[in-house]
Each structure stands twice: as structure tokens, then as C-alpha cells.
Image: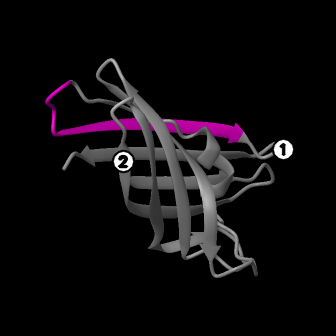
Amino acid sequence: MRISTQHTLHEGGACRSDWTVSGTIEIQPNGKTSGAADAKLTPPAGCDFTQSQVQSEAIRLVVTGARAGGVLRLSFAEGGRTPAGSTDLGGLTNTLRFIHPVVKLAPGAQAGHGATKVTRSDGDLGSYTSSTLLRVALQ
């Protein structure tokens, strides 16, 4: 999975971060899906202005979802980050719970992909945006 994020600030400028995500999910016979993945920062990440926050380098993701009617729907939550106490300047952690990719996986299909884009307010007239491309391969 690849995720590109941007935090656009209302007073001007933006911070960006791109992530490469890999992990494993298990799909139960009833369709319930669970797993874990690791998001790793793809350098460079940064802002249009000087700042002193420590950029996260890795974020552990908890994956849940369901497969029904030939469609796999996933959701994500944060399971931790490295270094401890860091922040993601681009805002992945601020959009993560709103990222819900949908992948068509008809019976017998061995692979699929889905894309999603999320934009949400940062609570101060700015916004967080994330664009996600997910590829799934069944084994």
C-alpha cells in the first residue's frame, strides 16, 4: 500500500509525508478480516517552513475489515509509532481512521486493488489529505 499525505495550514504552507505499507491480513471463512501492517516513511518528509517537531519514521497499523459479496473492505487504526513521541507532519495519523479502501475480490480472484482519498479539517481552518493505493494478493 502507498499513502501520500499533506497537512495544508490555513496561514500558508504545507507539510507532506509519503508512506510505504506492508503487512498481512487473515480472512476468516465468515469474511471477518484482521491483521497488522507497518507503514514506513518514504523520505523526504517535510514542511514549507522551519519547524522543530520530530517526524515519525514508522507507524504500526492494526487492520480490520470484512469480505462479503466479492468485496473486501478494510479499516485501520494506529498501533504505535517510532520514534516514541514523534508526530507525522503530513497527517497520516490524523486521517488513518477515515481510510477505508474497498477492493473487489470475486470468488477465485487472487489479487485486487483499491484507491481512496480522504480530506478532513485540522480543526483550525486547515486540512489533512491522504491518498491511498492498496494492492492485495491472496496466498
Question: Viewed as shown, does residue 101 lie left or right of 111?
Answer: right
Quarter of the image where one finds residue 108? top left
Reading the image, the residue beneath label 2 is 26
Judge whether 71 appears above or below 100 on screen: above
Please report the bounds of the magenta region as a residue range: 107-120
Pointer 2 and pointer 1: residues touching (CB < 8 Å)? no
Q: Is residue 4 magenta?
A: no
Which disc is residue 123 wearing? 1
Question: Viewed as shown, does residue 4 lie left or right of 114?
Answer: right
Report whether residue 116 is seen.
Answer: yes
Judge whether 136 appears above or below 21 on screen: above
Q: Nearer the viewer, residue 34 or 101?
A: 34
Residue drawn at x 47%, y 45% is 131
Judge whether 31 appears above or below 47 on screen: above
Q: Residues within 10 Å of mark 2 (few under 14, many from 20)?
A: some
Mark 2 / mark 1, whichever is N-terminal: 2
Tag 2 secondary structure: strand
Q: Where is residue 67 shown, x and y percent of the image? A: 38, 29
